[in-house]
Amino acid sequence: MPPSADPRTRAAGAPRIGIVIDRPDWHSRQLTKALDALGAAPVPLRLEACAFDTSSASGLRLDGFGDRLPDAVFVRTISGGSFEAVTMRLGILHALRELGVLVWNDARAIERCVDKSMTSFLLAQAGIPTPQTFTTQDREAARAIVAREVAHGPLVLKPLFGSQGRGLRLIRTADELPPPGDIAGVYYLQRFVGVERDGFHDFRLLVSGGRVVAAMMRHSTEWITNIKRGGRPVTVVANDDTEALAVRAAAAVGADFAGVDILYDRDERPSVLEVNSMPAWSGLQKVTSAGIAAALAADLLDAIDARARHEATA
């Protein structure tokens, strides 16, 4: 496709969608197939292969696009690396947003979700029920928190940056707190609200475009219910209250799509545990008839069209 004079100008024909990936996987293939079916032109986009270049018209050089800009970007996953490398990759996403490119999810939403303490803060500020959470870099302060709070039940120590249930610990005494070096220097402690009811279970709801498109229950004999840790996905129909809570949680962190984890406590009250801005959905797809990738693709293209209509009337 020949370059236009203005890299911000949308090319005629199929919208070009950058799919941010680490490497091709089942999710990116499903999303590519869904976008193709809707008449879009998906292009793999590796942030580690992108660069800032102030000599180009856009100020960027993008993998698969050169100095042209995509019509939208869908962030499936961001590859790991040093703090500097990840900061630059997020910087590319920030720059795309500044240039007017629609980014699902944008860097700000990703940063809010990757940092669990910020997620908890935003949920609480929005009045969304979430377990009490305490975060500190000081081990003695963490010990004092545990000594004070365990009278009301155990706490869960989680990595500030983490996913798929890795690194979770149940804390019942201050002596169970690991040294700072074992947890990257941050103690993120959350009230344990799990309840054993013939095993443990919670709910994962996938929100897209302001609605819930799929849901499942995760069941496990252990208190960590993540599918990657042996949890079993179970078909479920989420009730209206749970769906509304998931939609509010995604909005609180500014996510266009998100995986929202909800757990019911001993008093049958729902709480939002986490919001994932780059959720996987292979386990969820196994227990739902909804075409998840198709729904995500359709919502993204609808958002492109809605923005175009808004700009045309502005």
Image (spheres, rainbow, N blue to C red):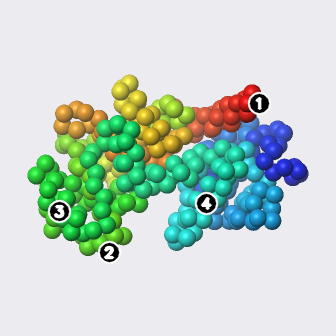
Q: Position of residue 296 (x, y in %)?
A: 58, 38
Q: Residues within 10 Å of mark 1 (few under 14, many from 20)?
A: few
**Residues under labels 4 and 2: Cα distance?**
28 Å
- Of the residues under marks 4 and 2, which one precedes in the sequence? 4
The kind of residue tagged 1 is Ala
Amino acid carrying mark 4 in the image: Gly
Q: Position of residue 176 (x, y in %)?
A: 18, 66
Q: Nearer the viewer, residue 34 or 59?
A: 59
Is 161 rendered above or below residue 104?
below
Circle number at residue 181: 2
Asked where in the image residue 155 lies, by quadrant, the reply is bottom left
Q: Which mark is residue 91?
A: 4
Dot 4 or dot 3, earlier in sequence:
4
Measure the alpha-carbon separation of dots 4 and 3: 37 Å
Marks 4, 2: nearer the viewer: 4
Does dot 1 land on a helix, a strand or a loop?
Answer: helix
Can I make out residue 27 in this image?
A: no
Q: Residue at x 73, y 44 (%)?
A: 71
Above or below residue 38? Residue 149 is below
Q: Residues within 10 Å of mark 3 (few under 14, many from 20)?
A: few
Q: Which mark, residue 144?
A: 3
Inspect the image, locate mark 2, and give the three-letter code of the amino acid beneath it.
Gly
Residue pointed to by mark 1: 312
